[in-house]
Image (cartoon, rainbow, N blue to C red):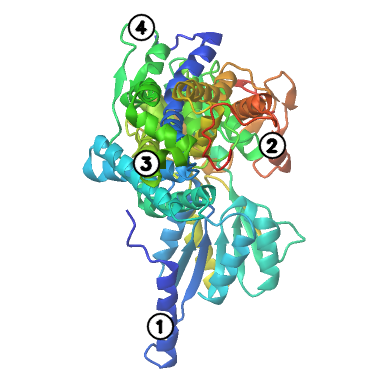
Amino acid sequence: MDFGRISRRHLLQGSAALALGSTLGTRGAAAAETTVGFIYVGSRDDYGYNQAHAQGAAAVKKLPGIKVVEEEKVPETDAVEKTIESMVNLDGATLLFPTSFGYYNPHVVKMAGKFPKLHFEHCGGLWSDKDPKNAGSYFGYIDEAQYISGIVAGYSTKSGKLGFVAAKPIPQVLRNINAFTLGARLANPKATTQVIFTGDWSMPVKEAEATNSLIDQGVDVLTCHVDGPKTMVENAARRGAMVCGYHVNQSPLAPKAYLTGAEWNWEALYPKFVKMIVAGEPIPNFYRGGLKEEIVKVSPYGEMVSAEARKHADDVKAKFMSGEYTIFKGPIADNKGKTVIAGGTDRGQQDPELEKMDYLVEGVIGATA
Amino acid sequence: MADASLGLWTVPLAVFGGAIRVSTPFLFVSLGECITERSGRINLGLEGTLVMGAMSAYGISYLSGSPWLGVLAAGMTGALFGALHAGICSLPRVNDIAVGIALMLLGTGLAFFLGKPLIEPTAARLPAIDFGWWSDIPQLRAALRINVLFLIGVAIAPLLYWAFRTTRWGLLIRTAGESADAARAMGHSVLLIRLRATMIGGFLAGIGGSFLSLFYPGSWNEGLSSGQGITAVALVIFARWDPMLCLWASLAFGGAAALGPALQSVGITSGYHLFNAAPYILTLAIMIITCSPKRTLTGAPAELSITR
């Protein structure tokens, strides 16, 4: 329940009063505050993508001298430009986090050109040399966390069949499916991942049907890449299957079925960014990282995760933390038998080839089109 | 037993299970709309009513701990929306389709606004009755875990069919729908009949919404309905204003919704967008085949603004 959260209007009134107060001299110069704006594409309580960002915003709120303004359900259209303009002009925001992939081009780029003194930090990893220097785009290699989930799932499955409820066959999603499967096959070389694409980011009825169909096929561990994993987690748990979460920790929804999950760690990254900006340090325009850079994390293991699984997963996690582990290490074949990464080739996380992923690795049952 | 795979048999099983799981909201909304349209009015706002019903059911179930109280609340909310629609439409020269669209937007918007704090908490769900106790096949047992609301919906369809044909109440609704003048000549208030018919229609649509949030998929979020209410309104025309045909059409749409994921789960992965679109293609095809410019649709109430 969050009836108590401050609305933008209240904030507006508050900041107006504050501005008035400082001109009257009732507040000293120390009251200079930085206002940070967060923009979400959906609802911030969705147990998914947007909630992960909102948790990051909540961490920023705790910093002294920082004021946070938020707006949710802003579509990836001109609407985001209007939101940015109102955050800048009315709330005095100097740092903005438009958190949805589709905000970037042309909207964030345009706004960054219009307000050259302000900072824009977009989530999606889309910045290129041609874009304004005050814009940045960051993203996390969440496939590292999916890989760990895969290892745990591989040890936990009894049938050797894993299920993946996915939205669309785009590179980011395929990378997660592939990493999850490669992780699972580390633990159980015979494990397979059955993937079902629902066609869009939020289709609760389709997601529930996909979950049921997978379990009917004998799948006993499921994960997903959709905006709100709640539907999959709850329906799978009701059918007695185990789940690995995504975006945020969903274990409160299904404490007995939740093995682990791949989570964003924005509550670590956002305060770091804000501190850097306040201190006047530059943030690289193109900022990426995985477990090591604390951009993603793995949910705490559930009770039924075996000691063997924990040990193996922790070992690999430690290697990620020291930066000496590569997920996409050749030879890797796709599920049609074609070699997609040749033997001896290591595709590290930064490799641009991985951004173009259009295949499913061996062990995945499904097709990209 | 857990890894017993049924192979390709899961597809018909999933379609069967899907028909039961997914069809209930379609069934309630289309039966409700059937009553409303038979009285001579179209309520396009049932999409909004469905979403409002889903939200209020979830909220009341969460606050009170009783899902049945939630179902009741959803029905009451629906009836209230129905009364609002009928009330506005009883003013002179008001177009019921325009009012319906306005109420659809109002209902969804209001539900999203009021439902904001309900996305996170988990509410008590409606129970299921286990009809698969005789079977050893876990997939079949899962498909046969049926909610009472579905059974109620299935029972309402023939009841309504019978009531339209043989009861005085059914005759009055039909008279209001076929010829308002005849109903007036008999000394009845057409507006009152339509008010009641629209309220009952809204009540049923609200209950359909409670199934979405309290049973399947079983939680409240903003993408929950994804157009099922408006599809169900179209189903009524598709079913020729016949409650029994509404039942079959709802089952077919429910089954079709399960087809896409089920085919992918057995490895038929190409063209899943096409399978997902199957119910809509089916509707279009049937509408085109059965429509004729020379006559009005068979079974269409003569007073409906779309046929008049």
Q: Which residue is mark 2?
A: A347
In the image, farthest residue toward the right: A130
- Foreground mark, 2 or 3, reads 3
SS under mark 3: helix
Dots 4 and 3 on the same chain: yes
SS under mark 2: strand
Q: Position of residue A347 (x, y in %)?
A: 69, 36
Q: Could you tell me how far apart the alpha carbons at marks 4 and 3 are, in whole angstroms?
A: 48 Å
SS under mark 1: helix
Dots 2 and 4 on the same chain: no
- Foreground mark, 4 or 3, reads 3
Q: Is residue A301 left or right of residue A339?
A: left
Is tag 4's residue or tag 3's residue first in the polypeptide sequence? Answer: 4
Disc 2: host chain:
A
Q: Which residue is mark 1?
A: A17
Q: Could you tell me how far apart the alpha carbons at marks 2 and 1 are, in whole angstroms?
A: 54 Å
Q: Amino acid at mark 1?
A: Ala
Q: Are marks 2 and 1 in contact (CB under 8 Å)?
A: no
Q: Could you tell me how far apart the alpha carbons at marks 4 and 1 are, in whole angstroms?
A: 69 Å
Residue at 69% x, 23% y is A334
Q: Can residue A247 be seen here?
A: no
Is tag 2's residue or tag 1's residue first in the polypeptide sequence? Answer: 1
Q: Position of residue B112 (x, y in %)?
A: 43, 51
Quarter assignment of residue B205: top left
Q: Amino acid at mark 4?
A: Ser
Q: Could you tell me how far apart the alpha carbons at marks 2 and 3 are, in whole angstroms?
A: 71 Å
